[in-house]
Image (cartoon, rainbow, N blue to C red):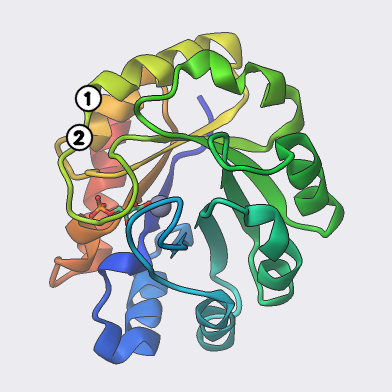
């Protein structure tokens, strides 16, 4: 099984003290910071731009920045996000760009790439890209907002991909808690984004450790 990774999603942080929240996430010994970029077109919400990625690099240079682009035209912003400090960039298979070209541009500019799939999209849509990606992100909510309910039906995609590619990094995002992460792990995922669950904790470090312990026991 691939290495387990836990990623707090900054969308659920207290925006009144973002720098302190980024430091809190890093101090929790989570593996990377997940940064959700929304363009109010691909999803019905607006969130962060490249300046927030720069802020994360400034306050926590050694904490990797995993940037999830929920954008209709992610291709127009790849260079900007990489120059701002993205360590990995995730683009949607449903976006309106040349996905092959954009995935290869991300790698060429020195970041890891990933393809993301929304709940209604059939898993077969990913097949043309599996040889070109470092990671697949299976959405377990319809993207746009934090704090939504985990859609367990999406886990059949995780199992399908895990059977097909034992070595692939498979991430899940949306509605991840101490109850749903073990289900996703059992289905074959090895990377877990958690926003509202982790940022609501008084002791995020203990919560991250307890998630890791839970997965080891299974
Ligand atoms: C949803 C975002 C998620 C979100 C997860 O559009 O892509 O990363 O922050 O939030 P929770 O963990 O609260 O569902
Ligand atoms: Zn996300």
Give the camera-side residue of 192 and 217.
192
Q: Is residue 81 left or right of residue 59?
A: right
> Would the CB of label 2 be found within 8 Å of ligand 1?
no
To which residue does mark 1 refer? 152
Q: Is residue 150 visible?
A: yes
Against 174, is 140 above or below?
A: above
Give the camera-side residue of 142 and 84.
142
| Closer to the eye: label 2 or 1 | 1
Q: Position of residue 13 (x, y in %)?
A: 27, 74
* Dot 2: element: loop
**Mark on residue 73?**
none
Q: Position of residue 14 (x, y in %)?
A: 24, 80
Q: Is residue 179 left or right of residue 41?
A: left
| Mark-to-mark CA distance, 2 and 1 | 8 Å
Q: Residues within 10 Å of mark 2 (few under 14, many from 20)?
A: some
Q: Residue placed at 13% from the left, 72% from the top?
A: 202
Asked whether the residues under the numbered discs 2 and 1 touch, taking CB atoms below 8 Å apart as contact, a structural biologist would say yes
Choose top left, top right, bottom left or bottom right for residue 28: bottom left
Q: Residues within 10 Å of mark 1 (few under 14, many from 20)?
A: some
Q: Residue placed at 32% from the left, 53% from the top?
A: 144
Q: Position of residue 131 (x, y in %)?
A: 75, 24
Q: Residue placed at 52% from the left, 85% from the top?
A: 55
Total number of numbered discs in the rendering: 2
To which residue does mark 2 refer? 180
* Dot 1: element: helix
Q: Residue placed at 26% from the left, 36% from the top?
A: 181
Q: Position of residue 74 (x, y in %)?
A: 63, 55
């Amino acid at each position: 099984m691939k290495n387990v990774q836990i990623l707090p999603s900054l969308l659920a942080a207290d925006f009144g003290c973002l720098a302190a929240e980024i430091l809190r996430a890093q101090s929790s010994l989570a593996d990377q910071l997940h940064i959700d970029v929304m363009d109010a077109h691909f999803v019905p919400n607006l969130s962060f731009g490249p300046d927030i990625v720069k802020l994360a690099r400034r306050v926590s240079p050694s904490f990797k920045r995993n940037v999830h682009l929920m954008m209709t035209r992610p291709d127009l912003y790849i260079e900007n996000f990489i120059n701002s400090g993205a360590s990995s960039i995730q683009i949607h298979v449903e976006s309106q760009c040349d996905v092959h070209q954009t995935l290869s541009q991300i790698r060429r500019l020195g970041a890891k790439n990933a393809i993301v799939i929304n709940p209604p999209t059939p898993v077969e849509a990913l097949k043309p890209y599996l040889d070109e990606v470092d990671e697949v992100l299976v959405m377990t909510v319809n993207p746009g907002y934090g704090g939504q309910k985990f859609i367990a039906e999406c886990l059949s995609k995780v199992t399908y991909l895990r059977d097909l590619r034992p070595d692939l990094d498979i991430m899940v995002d949306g509605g991840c808690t101490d109850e749903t992460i073990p289900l996703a792990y059992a289905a074959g995922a090895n990377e877990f984004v958690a926003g509202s669950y982790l940022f609501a904790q008084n002791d995020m470090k203990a919560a991250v450790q307890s998630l890791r312990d839970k997965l080891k026991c299974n």
